[in-house]
């Protein structure tokens, strides 16, 4: 396990303060606000810690306020329902006495029924694609501090890098992703790591047709909500194809969809996110 992944696992190992109350720590990084994937993953972990049977099958959430990266986050869990097949939890993330994030998650005891799925896109294998650091180095781009430091999630972009002038204007992006190391055999941990990773690049599909970059001084973007559906067991420390697209951007809001396929072609996770796309 890399040091960066070890830190992520530590961030997900929430401190139990009281029954239904947990505290999450923050990474020692220079950030203007808490990374959305972090608060979503910690909130899901808080919910899962209160569930006795079943695995998470869906989450629906809203980002309410920017999180303060300098103080811990409290997660208050409301045990909405404990059923035979489905269990529901509501989680509110709190800082400075105010809610910054709201999540509702449902857990399901596994059942067997009929099946179908969309086919996995035909893309190159991840082993044939250089790492992100290698590609930036090969392109002669600037290797800043972000590219030099380790990251918990390895990313290998299919096609041109999103900031490349040759990148397609199609509202779509495909990336192979996986945790940078081996995780424990805990389905909740793998779901939380995938939740963390899902917020890293989903928004980029919205920006692709407009040649907009996050460091553009005339653009302000933020995740508004985030929904995920976990269809089957998977490992977040094995390669997953993150296939994303954006059906629409209008009225300073854009919609993005994402699908995680394992290397066997099984659709494991689906997600949808709406983001604020404001020009200033």
Image (tube, grey):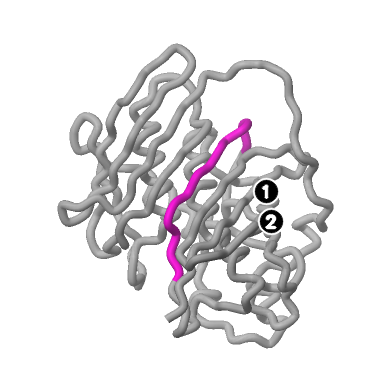
- Residue 30 against residue 61 in the figure, above or below: below
Callout 1 environment at 10 Å: few (<14), some (14 to 19), or many (20+)? many
Front in this rendered view, residue 231 or 218: 218
Q: Position of residue 49 (x, y in %)?
A: 36, 31
144 to the left or right of 38: right
Q: Nearer the viewer, residue 181 or 40?
A: 40
Q: Residue 95's image quarter?
A: bottom left
Q: Residue furthest top?
A: 84
Looking at the image, which residue is at 45% across and 41% down?
A: 60
Q: Quadrant of residue 204?
A: bottom right
Alpha-carbon span between mark 1 and mark 2: 6 Å
Identity of the residue drawn at 56% across and 57% down: 255
Indicate the quadrant where residue 217 lies. bottom left
Question: Element type at marker 1?
Answer: strand
Depicted 240 relative to depicted 278: above or below: above
Residue 1 visible somewhere in the drawing: no
- Residue range in magenta is 221-234
Residue extending farthest left: 97
Please name the residue shown 50% across and 47% down the image.
Answer: 195
Estimate the x, y position of residue 84 in percent, counting from the top left.
45, 12
Query: Does 69 sit left or right of 200 as displayed?
Result: left
Which mark sits nearer the N-terminus, 1 or 2?
A: 2
Q: Which is the main secondary structure of the residues drawn in magenta?
A: strand
Q: In front here: 203 or 235?
A: 203
Q: Which mark is residue 240?
A: 1
Q: Which residue is mark 2?
A: 176
- Please tell me which residue lies in front, 25 or 229: 229
What residue do we see at 24% from left, 37% from top? 16
Marks 1 and 2 in Cβ contact (< 8 Å): yes
């Amino acid at each position: 396990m890399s040091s960066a992944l070890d830190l992520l696992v530590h961030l997900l190992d929430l401190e139990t303060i009281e029954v239904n109350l947990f505290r999450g720590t923050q990474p020692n990084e220079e950030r203007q606000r808490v990374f959305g994937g972090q608060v979503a993953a910690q909130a899901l972990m808080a919910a899962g810690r209160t569930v006795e049977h079943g695995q998470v099958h869906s989450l629906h959430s809203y980002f309410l306020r920017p999180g303060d990266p300098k103080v811990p986050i409290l997660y208050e869990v409301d045990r909405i329902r404990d059923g035979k097949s489905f269990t529901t939890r509501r989680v509110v993330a709190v800082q400075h006495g105010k809610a910054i994030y709201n999540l509702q998650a449902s857990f399901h005891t596994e059942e067997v029924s009929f099946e179908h799925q969309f086919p996995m896109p035909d893309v190159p294998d991840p082993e044939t694609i250089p790492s992100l650091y290698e590609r930036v180095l090969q392109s002669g781009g600037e290797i800043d501090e972000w590219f030099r430091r380790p990251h918990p999630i390895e990313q290998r972009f299919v096609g041109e890098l999103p900031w490349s002038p040759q990148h397609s204007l199609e509202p779509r992006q495909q990336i192979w992703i996986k945790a940078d190391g081996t995780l424990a055999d805990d389905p909740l941990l793998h779901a939380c790591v995938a939740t963390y990773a899902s917020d890293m690049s989903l928004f980029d599909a919205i920006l692709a047709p407009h040649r907009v970059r996050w460091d553009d001084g005339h653009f302000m973007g933020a995740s508004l909500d985030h929904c995920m559906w976990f269809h089957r067991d998977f490992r977040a420390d094995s390669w997953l194809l993150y296939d994303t697209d954006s059906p629409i951007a209008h009225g300073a809001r854009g919609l993005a969809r994402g699908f995680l396929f394992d290397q066997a072609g099984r659709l494991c996770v689906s997600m949808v996110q709406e983001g604020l796309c404001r020009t200033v």
